[in-house]
Image (cartoon, grey):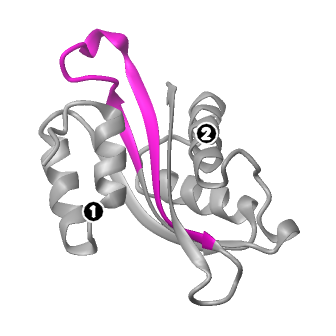
């Protein structure tokens, strides 16, 4: 297993892990100074994906509902969605849908260099495709921003 010593690894590993492993990985990451929020979202609307992730992060106390933190989280989500959508942030407009597991992580960019301040990272893993079961493929995305 990958060490949970950078914010990007924590975000990706917890997004990629199977459901039964996700919570134990999040607890393990906490020992390195990371706070992790986990969830799932599915939609044909990218705005709904953004809203679900933002809502979960605020509800779990990972980010505060203040402009600088909301703005950093928004940019991390958009960067991760660019990976999922291959740079074209359109879902329903071109008749496609996503089903994603997400993780939002707050903490140092790297455990070995904590002086770089706090960061927020978003990891996404799931499927994208036409809204017909069996016509989707796997996707992954990672985004991060300095708080």
Numbered label attached to residue 140: none
Which residue is at the far top?
Answer: 115
* In this picture, residue 6 sits left or right of residue 48: left
Q: Quadrant of residue 50?
A: bottom right
**Residue 64 rendering spot, x and y as whole percentages:** 51, 40
* In this picture, residue 66 sits left or right of residue 91: left
Above/below status of 12 relative to 71: below
**Residue 103 rendering spot, x and y as whole percentages:** 40, 54
Q: Quadrant of residue 5?
A: top left
**Residue 80 rendering spot, x and y as whole percentages:** 56, 45
Say what secondary structure mark 1 lies in.
Answer: loop
Q: Quadrant of residue 60?
A: bottom left
* In this picture, residue 34 sits left or right of residue 144: left
Say what secondary structure mark 2 lies in.
Answer: helix
Which residue is at the far bottom?
Answer: 133
Of the pair 76 and 117, the residue shown nearer to us: 76
Q: Main secondary structure of the magenta part?
A: strand
Above/below status of 90 relative to 121: below
Q: Please tell me which residue is depicted at 47% across the width and 45% down the height of the picture.
A: 122
Residue ID for mark 1? 17
Which residue is at the far right?
Answer: 93
Residue ID for mark 2? 79
Of the pair 48 and 69, the residue shown nearer to us: 48
* Label 2 CA crowd tier, 10 Å (few <14, some 14–19, many 20+): many
Q: Does 79 appear in magenta?
A: no
Region rendered in magenta? 104-128
């Amino acid at each position: 297993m990958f060490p949970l010593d950078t914010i990007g690894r924590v975000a990706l590993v917890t997004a990629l892990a199977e459901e039964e492993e996700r919570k134990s990985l999040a607890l393990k990451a906490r020992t390195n100074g990371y706070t992790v929020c986990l969830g799932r979202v599915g939609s044909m609307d990218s705005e709904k994906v953004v809203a679900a992730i933002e809502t979960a992060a605020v509800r779990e106390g990972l980010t505060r509902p203040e402009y600088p933190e909301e703005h950093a989280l928004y940019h991390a989500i958009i960067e991760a969605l660019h990976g999922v959508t291959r740079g074209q942030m359109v879902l329903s407009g071109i008749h496609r849908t996503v089903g994603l597991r997400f993780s939002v992580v707050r903490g140092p960019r790297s455990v070995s260099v904590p002086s770089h301040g706090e960061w927020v990272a978003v990891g996404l893993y799931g499927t994208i495709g036409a809204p017909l079961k069996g016509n989707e493929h796997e996707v992954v995305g990672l985004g991060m921003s300095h708080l």
